Image (cartoon, rainbow, N blue to C red):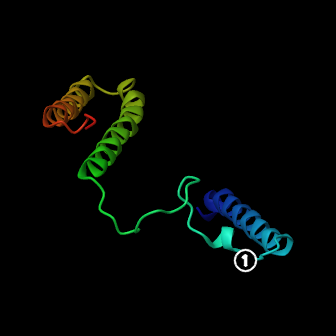
Amino acid sequence: MLQEYLPVLIFLGVAAGIGALLLTLGFLIGSGKKYDEKLSPYECGFEPFEDSRIKFDVRYYLVAILFIIFDLEIAFLFPWAVIYLTEIPAVFYEMLIFIAILFFGVVYSWRKGVLQRR
């Protein structure tokens, strides 16, 4: 039984070894000098011009949450496509219900105006 996990342990050991090697090389080769440009905060190439504690618009968070929800939808559709080829037809109807719930979520968000620019 333990022999079945040997390839996984070898893979983890090789991955940890490569990670440690790259970190060590970066430490040895890099200069490590600190200067003003390196220590300044980076904001997409622009100089910071306001306080970092400004409030974000709520729509930013709503769009981010919607992206995560529909990204997870795709993650559930791939295993479903594999299972559907071998399982009973009830799986197809379960996925239709799942997609319908997500569709009504999009319609609700659309009606609330979450997806519109202002």
Which quarter shows the C terminus?
A: top left
User: Relative to residue 83, is residue 107 drawn left or right?
Assistant: left
Neighbours of disc 1 within 10 Å: few (<14), some (14-19), many (20+)? few
Which is more toward the observer, 74 or 41? 41
Q: Secondary structure at mark 1?
A: loop
In front: 26, or 22? 26
Residue occupying image coordinates x 28% and y 25%: 88
**Image-based side of 51 in relation to 6, left or right:** left
Residue 69 in percent (x, y) is at 30, 43
Residue 67 vertical placement versus 39 (above, below): above
Q: Is residue 59 above or below residue 18?
A: above
Task: Provide residue 103's location: percent of width, then percent of height.
Answer: 21, 29
Which quadrant: the N terminus?
bottom right
Kind of residue sitting beneath label 1: Lys
Give residue 16's quadrant in the image. bottom right
Q: Which residue in the rendered view is the most extreme toward the front?
A: 49
Per the image, the residue denoted by label 1 is 34
Instruction: Look at 18% across and 34% down and name the residue there.
Output: 101
Question: Observer-nearest residue: 73 or 61?
Answer: 61
Q: Residue at x 77, y 65 (%)?
A: 22
Q: Is residue 114 above or below residue 22?
A: above
* Front in this rendered view, residue 91 or 59: 59
Snapshot quadrant of residue 7: bottom right
Q: Position of residue 34 (x, y in %)?
A: 72, 77
Residue 26, position as x, y percentages in the image: 79, 69
